[in-house]
Amino acid sequence: MEITVFFEPENVFIERLNSFKNVLYFGDYIRANDKDQIDTINLEDHYELFVISSNELSGVNNHVMENIGRLIERIQVIYSFRHIYINNPTKTTLKTLKSTFKLEISEPYILHSVSEEKLVKIESEFDDFLIGQITAKKKIIRNLLKLLIRTNNKPLVLMLYGNPGIGKTETAKFLAKQLNEGEIVREQMSMVHGEESLKYFKSTHHSEHSFSKKLLNRTSNIILLDEFARSPSYIQDSFLQMFDEGVYEDNNYSVDIRKSVIICTSNFLTEDDMKKNIDNALLSRFDALIKYEDFNDDEKELIIKLSINGIKKTISEKYASMVDWEKLQCFLIYNVKGLTNMRHIKGIIEEAVADEVLRKLKK
């Protein structure tokens, strides 16, 4: 009996199972032996592969977890499978299995996000995606290059700071799209507080939803921590090893995130403000603190034009025909100094369009 342990996203692991015809899942076995569900699952006499995934282990109690080795031996006697695949076991489960079986541990699944070709593409398309922020964009490209030239596996950790609505979060989304095809890992850190958040980031029990599980199953190597400086210090401490070594560790998992790009954002306007809210030991692990400047009037005018064109495409032709778009654009450009950021501009345009449509409907 060969037992192989994998540490990889669930979707990657599922693809790995496609080469097997007859697979018994741990969860199906447990349900088939549950008195309340015994008639819902019919097990066959023989299986080629036995599979245990982290999702299935989340639903079992501590007694099963503590006796997982003996349970596997008992199931193998019944079904005679030659191979066992285990994906993302907890640290405790892995320790228990090692004491019972000889395991083959597969290399961790590493998402390689940066290449020379991708960097060239980012630089050529950055200006089309994000208006302004010339200095910030240059610093980001320069720092992304570090992932190519470094000999260690440290992740790239960036802090993008400045007023809201000027492109910080949009930058992270743009990089995720350019560097990976997967969905960005995003946490709103300003919402983090209390016991539930502590459980989420420390993962005290294997059945709990946790940040570590989210990282294990990520399909993108871009990790976005919005408003990081607003999170409490006892949560920020969880990221020391992650920022420094590319390992996120809680009570249940040790997640390999080497070569990843970690983007933190903050609405603070100065580095001094961040130093007051982030411990120096953690702040020193950032590769760069990059300031996003407020838009000048020329940049806001361009945002107005692009936003109007975008909104025109998203509403039905019936209502679009009710709006004098040229008049609206001229009005906004004339009052450009009163507009602050992208969200403000788009909100004003949408309100003006709604008012104009309503006025026409009343006639």
Image (spheres, rainbow, N blue to C red):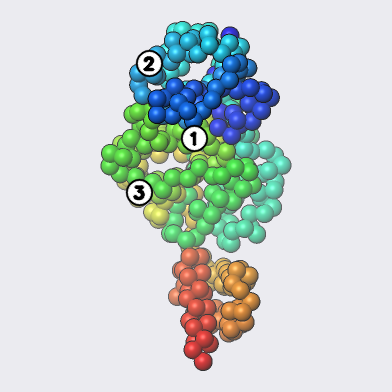
Q: Are marks 3 and 2 in contact (CB under 8 Å)?
A: no
Q: Secondary structure at mark 3?
A: helix
Q: Give the mark nearer the N terminus: 3 vs 2.
A: 2
Q: Is residue 238 visible?
A: no
Q: N-terminal of the two: label 3 or label 1?
A: 3
Of labels 3 and 2, the one closer to you = 2
In the image, residue 29 above or below residue 111: above
- List the single residue furthest toward the left: 194
Residue annotated with mark 1: 215
Residue at 35 percent across and 21 percent down: it is: 62
User: Considering the numbered disc 1 on the image, is that residue within a helix, a strand or a loop?
Assistant: helix
Percent across and percent down for residue 28 are 50, 26
The percent coordinates of residue 324 (x first, y second) are: 59, 84
Q: Residue at x 50, y 73 (%)?
A: 350
What is the crowding at mark 2: few (fewer than 14 residues within 10 Å), some, or many (at least 20)? some
Mark 3 highlights which residue? 191
- Looking at marks 1 and 2 on the same chain, the residue that comes earlier in the sequence is marked by 2
Asked whether 216 or 147 is in front, the reply is: 216
- The residue positioned 50% from the left and 54% from the top of the image is 168
Residue in view at x 43 percent, y 59 percent: 163
Q: Is residue 198 above or below residue 340?
A: above
- Residue for badge 2: 66
